[in-house]
Each structure stands twice: as structure tokens, then as C-alpha cells.
Image (cartoon, grey):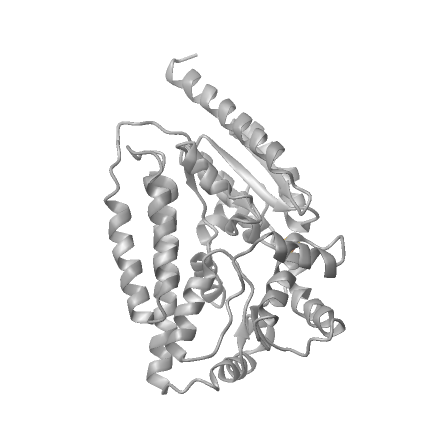
Amino acid sequence: MKVTFPHMGNVYIAVKILFDGLGIDYVIPPINNKTALEIGVTYAPEEMCLPYKIMIGNYIQSIEQGADTILLVGSCGPCRFGEYCELQMKALEKLGHNLKFIVMDYPKDIGKRELLKRVEYLISESPKNAGEKAVAALRALKAINLIDKIEERAHYLAGYEINRGDCKKLLNQCKRDVFKTNDPNEGIKTLENYRKMIEKVEIDKSRNPLKVAVIGEIYTVIDPFSNLNIEDKLMDYGVCSKRKLTPSWWVKDAAMKVLKLNSLDLRRASREYLPYYIGGHARECIGEAMIAQKENFDGAIQIFPMGCMPEIITKAILPSISRDKNFPIMSLVVDEMTGEGGYITRIEAFLDLIERRQKDVSYGC
Ligand code: SF4
């Protein structure tokens, strides 16, 4: 068995640490890129959403490197993601690839016993004992929390850094260093070191940088290739950015869902404008916009793939929030046709707008 999985932001770092710890053979597809998207576009239905297409590209690039098993998380929710695994299985089968899919669905959807059966299958080829397997899982959890925290701090501190580019450099170096090692303990140590280093970046606390919340569909906000590296761009402009949806947030949310205690802050915040679950992470998107406004952020940028059903609904709600709360929000739709030039122009125009508003407020206009 040679396992692969689709990319989603920093997930590959934690999965690598997990599989290295378990001693399982795996393939990490090349970081999301144009070729993966082109492959996906060739084999996916045109109207399918962007994450599906990139994932197909990931699988095929991994199959070329010998992968025969695909690990992915499922969701029986009312959006296309709930159908991804079935559709992807069929699409790959049609292409003549005979692969095993291991889908980690929520226990409420498939039952605890079935979930355990799937976990057991995944780790069946691990030569480690039960204790070592548990340690490997805990290490992976620690890794995803660490890398998400480092990234969160880098995105935020970029607005205050004295030497422009320090945070971005450190973040990229961290990802490169942790990826280099096949020793999971060394991987964790590397992440712990960078966690300390990011707090030591020289900053000027007297600055008043623009603060922008990045909200929207979970895959496109997390995956830099899909959102055309928006967070890197904001760092380059010296803007603080914040995003609540991360892989570690997803893990916590999934765990707390069993007790119905997941993301209470976001659900509470979204109640005024979207009190119902409508699929995807629509409620989280509305909740994040509301929280960002309360935390005195200067604006929010929503990103979602063309045709994303839940985010089309939130896009229709966000202008009401913007008007009622006097809070600028811009929506960006991405797909394989998105051109970088127009995308950057829109971001820069939005930043100009919120900068002018910030100045007007400070001069008392
Ligand atoms: S949330 Fe949107 S983009 Fe993501 S799978 Fe559902 S419909 Fe597609």
C-alpha cells in the first residue's frame, strides 16, 4: 500500500510527520500547481468546483509516483464536498486507475465502528506497536497546531515588522526545513524552534497597519495556489491578516461536533444574519465577518470558488453586514480562468479604500 492524499494548505506537513511516525509508505503530491489544475480541468466536469479539480490533479500526479491508495476526509454535508469521494472514485476508475479510497467521515455519518475499521485499515501496514501509533497520531496533531500557529503569527506580525519580508521569509524557511526531514521528532523540534523564532521578529508596536480578515470557502482560503497567494501579497503590502479557518481549526471543530460544541463563537456571531447550517462553511464565513468587525479590523476579503453553493449565499448576505455595520467587505471568486492582474488590482483598490477610511477616522473626518 502506497498512500497519497490531496493537498490543503499545510496538511501535508502533519501527514508527513504522521506517516513517517507510523512507518507507512506514502507519496506527497507536488505542491498545488498549474499542472495539477490543468489535469483536474481535463478530467473533471466543467461546472465542478475548483477544489475538486485540483484534487484530481493531486491524485494523478501521485499515481504517477506509484500511489495506489487515497486518503481523504469526507463530509456528508449538503454541498458538493459530500459527493467528492464517490465522484472522484468513478472519475479515476474511468481513467483506468484501480485505487483504494479510505474516506474519513464524521462518526455521526458512518458510525464509530466504521470509522475505526477505516483507521485500522490505514494503519494495518504500520510495523509500529499500538503505543508508537498513538504517539505518531499525537505528534501529527501537534505539528498541525504548530505550523498553523506559526503561519497565523507571521500573517499578523507582517503588519508590524521593521524589516519588510522577515515574517514571510521565516515562514517559508520553516516549511522548507520541516519538509526536509524524515524524522518526525526532528520535524516537531524544527516547528517548535520556528514557533519561538516568529515571536522574535523585530516589530514596531507603535504602527497602525491595516487589518484584514480573510474569510470564505475553507479550501480556497487555506490553499495559497487557489487564492493566488493572497496572504503572501498582504504580507508584502505590510497588512496584518487573520484567518480563522485552518486545518487545526477543522480538526478541533470536527472533534467538538460530536458534543455539538464546535465553533460556538462563530455560530453565535453568525446568528443575526445566518442562523442556519446551509452547508460548506457559510455560517463560519458570516461569523468571521462579524467577529472581524467587532475586533476593529479594517475590512474583510471573502474568497470562494466559482459555483460554490454555500458561499454564493454568503456573498448575498455580506453586503447587508457591510452596510449595517459600516464594514468594508470584498468578495473574490476564483477558478481556473482567474487572471492574476485583475485579481491584484482589485485587492489593491480595496486596500486603498480601507486605508483612506482609516485615515479619515484618525483625522476625525
Ligand atoms: S464548499 Fe463550495 S467549493 Fe467547497 S465543495 Fe462545497 S460547493 Fe464546492
Answer whether residue 279 is visible to the viewer in this image. Answer: no
Q: Is residue 197 left or right of residue 81?
A: left
241 and 272: which is toward the camera: 241
Answer whether residue 98 is visible to the viewer in this image. Answer: yes
Picture coordinates of residue 40 (x, y %)? Answer: 68, 58
Picture coordinates of residue 335 (x, y %)? Answer: 66, 46
Asked if 24 appears above or below 162 in the picture, the reply is: below
Q: Quadrant of the N terminus?
A: bottom right
Asked if 333 appears above or below 341 in the picture, the reply is: below
141 and 259: which is toward the camera: 141
- Residue at the spot x=62%, y=32% of the render? 342
- Residue at the spot x=63%, y=61% of the render? 57
240 and 76: which is toward the camera: 240
Q: Quadrant of residue 334?
A: top right
Total tally of numbered discs in the picture = 0
Q: Quadrant of the C terminus?
A: top left
- Residue at the spot x=29%, y=53% of the render? 195
Picture coordinates of residue 67 (x, y %)? Answer: 57, 75
Asked if 84 appears above or below 353 in the picture, the reply is: below
Q: Is residue 22 left or right of residue 338?
A: left
* Residue found at the very far front of the displayed protein: 64
Picture coordinates of residue 200 (x, y %)? Answer: 23, 44
